[in-house]
Image (tube, rainbow, N blue to C red):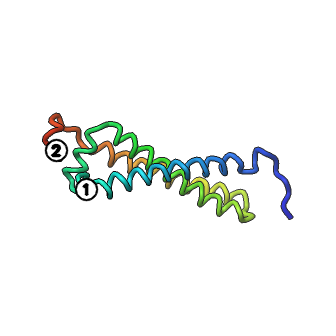
Amino acid sequence: MYKYKGTKDSGSKSWLLQRISGLALVVFMIGHYVLMHYTPESGHTYDAVLGRMQYSWYRIIDITFVTLAMYHGLNGVWGIFRDYNLKTWQNYAIVTALIVFGIAFVAWGYVIIFSIPYINDVASVMP
């Protein structure tokens, strides 16, 4: 039988952040879809991506998108594991693995975003 654990252990913060990050991801995905698929001049070539990434706000959007997506996904996976009555050491092992995995992949995404060079002459790369 379920025993009330108290507000601190109830997962309510995690539940709320899951909903907020999901809503933000929907907004970001709609923006991404419109930008990448309904704007013919946006293109998917290296030059088009390089041209877009000359503007810092594109990088900020991408960083936010990567971070929110990773948090949302890993929080969802943790929510699945929370449904099982695991031993304390198993909970710690799973949380540690999720955190390490999340940090590694977010860092990889940041490295990719920041490795795209800034070009002095933006007009030469913009379509």
Image quadrant assignment for residue 40: bottom left
Residue, disc 1? 40
Q: Helix, strand, or loop for circle 1?
A: loop
**Displayed quadrant of residue 29:** bottom left
Q: Residue furthest top?
A: 120
Q: Who's the residue at 52% across and 48% down the image?
A: 24
Q: Residue at x 23, y 38 (%)?
A: 118
Residue nearer the viewer, 37 or 84: 37
| Viewer-nearest residue: 13 or 103 | 13
| Callout in the foreground (2, 1) | 1
In the picture provided, is 52 more to the left or to the right than 17?
Answer: left
Residue 107 at x, y = what percent?
41, 47
Position of 85 relative to 34 (above/below): below
Q: Amino acid at mark 1?
A: Pro
The numbered disc on residue 125 is 2
Q: Is residue 111 above or below residue 74?
A: above
In the rendered structure, the answer to whether residue 116 lies left or right of residue 81 reads: left
How many numbered discs, if any? Answer: 2
Which numbered dot is residue 19? none
Find residue 33 and report its horizontal and vertical position in percent.
38, 56
Q: Residue at x 59, y 60 (%)?
A: 77
Q: Is residue 89 above or below residue 119?
A: below
In this picture, residue 125 sits left or right of residue 11: left
Is residue 26 toward the left or the right of residue 1 in the image? left
Q: Position of residue 20 (x, y in %)?
A: 59, 47
Q: Quadrant of the N terminus?
A: bottom right
Residue 12 at x, y percent in the picture = 71, 48
Mark 1 Cα-neighbour bin, 10 Å: few <14, some 14–19, many ≥20 = few
